[in-house]
Image: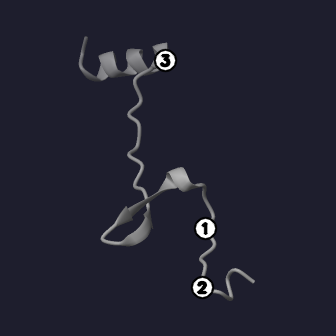
């Protein structure tokens, strides 16, 4: 009934959307850089740098 009245169904919660230029658009969430490395990853990086 609501869709027939012109309402739009959104798949995510309200925190995933923002209003840009008068339209509701999904937010762009930036990728989080990896800051925790395993011992093996550190060892391989040191080998490639000849340390």
The quadrant of the picture occupied by the C terminus is top left
Residue holding disc 1:
10
Could you tell me which residue is drawn at 61 percent across and 79 percent down? Answer: 7
| Crowd tier of the residue under label 2, counting other residues whose Cα lies within 10 Å: few below 14, some 14–19, many 20 or above | few
The quadrant of the picture occupied by the N terminus is bottom right
Relative to 42, residue 7 above or below:
below
Q: Which circle marks residue 50 in the picture?
A: none
Could you tell me which residue is drawn at 24 percent across and 16 percent down? Answer: 50
Picture coordinates of residue 43, whole percent (x, y): 40, 15
Picture coordinates of residue 36, whole percent (x, y): 44, 20
The Cα atoms of the two marked residues, 1 and 3, are separated by 39 Å
Residue holding disc 3:
38
Which circle's residue, 1 or 3, is located before the other in the chain?
1
* Horizontal side, residue 40 vs residue 44: left or right: right
The Cα atoms of the two marked residues, 1 and 2, are separated by 13 Å
- Which type of secondary structure does the marked residue at label 2 adopt? loop
């Amino acid at each position: 009934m609501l869709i027939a009245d012109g309402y739009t169904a959104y798949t995510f919660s309200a925190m995933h959307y923002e209003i840009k230029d008068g339209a509701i658009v999904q937010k762009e969430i930036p990728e989080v850089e990896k800051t925790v490395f395993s011992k093996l990853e550190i060892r391989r990086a040191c080998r490639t740098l000849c340390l």
